Amino acid sequence: MVNEDENSIDAASEGNCSQGGNFHQCTLFDITIDPGLKDDEGNELPRPFTKSQMRKWLKKVKWVNRKAEKRAREKKKSKERRKEARAANVDLGPSRKALKKMKFERDKKSTGIIIDLSFDHLMIEKDRFKVIKQILRCYSINRRSEPPLQFHITSFGEKSKNDMARHNGYEHWDIQFNEESYMDVFPKEKLVYLTSDSENVIEEFEEDTMYIIGGLVDHNQYKGLCHKLAVEQGIRHGQLPLDKYINMKTRKVLTIDHVFEIVLKVCEGEPWQEALMRVLPLRKGAHVCDKTSTLDSSSEIADKSDNESN
C-alpha cells in the first residue's frame, strides 16, 4: 500500500514503490488520493495512460498532497514573524484572522474595480493560472487598504471557477463574484474600461464609478482587444497617465495587479508619480520624467519644424 505523503508520490512518479524491502512496479491505481483531472469545461477526464497525461496527473496529485503541509508551514512562519515583530516593537498591521473579521464591518469607497474574465477562451491553462494569481494579489492589497475599493469579478465562468477552486474558501473572500457580464450588473454610464490603447487619459478616479481591468494574459497576441470591446459596447474608456509622470524602458503594458494597486493608491490620495514609482517593478526601468529635458526636446522639435517650413 502506498502512503499518502509526498514521498510516496515522488516514488510513484519514478515508477518504483517500496514494500517491505522489495520493489514492485507502481501503477496509477496504487495512488489512493486522486484529485482527478478535468477539461476546460469542468468534465471529469478518465485516468491518464499517455506519458504527458501521466505527468500532468502526478503533478496535480503531488500538489494536493503537499497543500496541507505547505499551509501549515506558512502558518508557522507567520506566527514566528509576528512574535519577532512584537519583540522588536514593530507593527505588522492586522492579522489575516482580524482582517476576515473586519471584512463586512468596513466601509468601502464608492469607486470600484471590476476584473473582466470574459477572455478565458483566448488563454491556455498556464496563462489562466497567472490571471488567478494576480487576482489573489489584488485581493491581498485591497483588504489591507483603509478603506478598500469595491472589488468585483465578472464573467466568472466554469474555467475560472475550476482554476479558482485550487484556493480553498475563495467564496468567502471580500470579492463579489458574478457569472454575468459587467454590462448586466452595472449601469453603462458608471463603467470605464482601463486600456493603454485609449486616447483618453485619466487624471482622477470618479466616485460611484467602476473601472474595468481586462483579465487577460496574452503576450501581446490580442493588442487593442479591450479598447475594441469598450468601443463596441459604447462604454467609456481611458488609460493611466504614464507618459505624463514617468519614462519606461519597456512597453507600457502593466499586469492586472499593478493597475489595481496604482488605482488603489491614487484613490487613497497618493500623488500619481509616487504611486507609479512605488508600484512598478524595477524590470520596467521606470524613472521620473525630466520636465526640463522634455521641454528642451519639444523646443528643438518646434525649431526644427520652423526651419523646415522656412
Image (cartoon, rainbow, N blue to C red):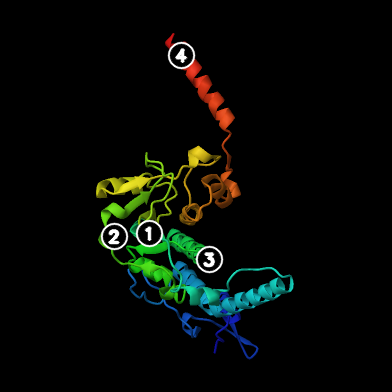
Q: Quadrant of the C terminus?
A: top left
Q: How many numbered discs, if any?
A: 4
Of marks 4 and 1, which one's residue comes earlier in the chain?
A: 1
Of marks 2 and 3, which one's residue comes earlier in the chain?
A: 3
Of marks 4 and 2, which one's residue comes earlier in the chain?
A: 2
Of marks 1 and 2, which one's residue comes earlier in the chain?
A: 1
According to the picture, the residue beneath numbered tag 3 turns out to be 144
Q: Which residue type does callout 1 highlight? A: Ile
Name the spot of residue 94 as percent of width and height, x first.
58, 72
Q: Residues within 10 Å of mark 3 (few under 14, many from 20)?
A: some
Residue nearest the viewer, comparing 176 with 94: 94
According to the picture, the residue beneath numbered tag 2 turns out to be 186
- Name the residue at 49% across, 74% down: 102
- Name the residue at 45% across, 63% down: 132
Name the spot of residue 66 as percent of width and height, x first.
56, 77
Q: Which residue type does callout 4 highlight? A: Asp
Q: Which residue type does callout 3 highlight? A: Arg
Instruction: State which mark lies toward you, 3 or 4.
Output: 3
Residue nearest the viewer, comparing 24 with 247: 247
Of marks 3 and 1, which one's residue comes earlier in the chain?
A: 1
* Quarter of the view holding residue 69: bottom right
CB under 8 Å between discs 1 and 2: yes
According to the picture, the residue beneath numbered tag 4 turns out to be 306
Residue nearest the viewer, comparing 201 with 217: 201
According to the picture, the residue beneath numbered tag 1 turns out to be 114
Q: Is residue 219 above or below residue 112?
A: above
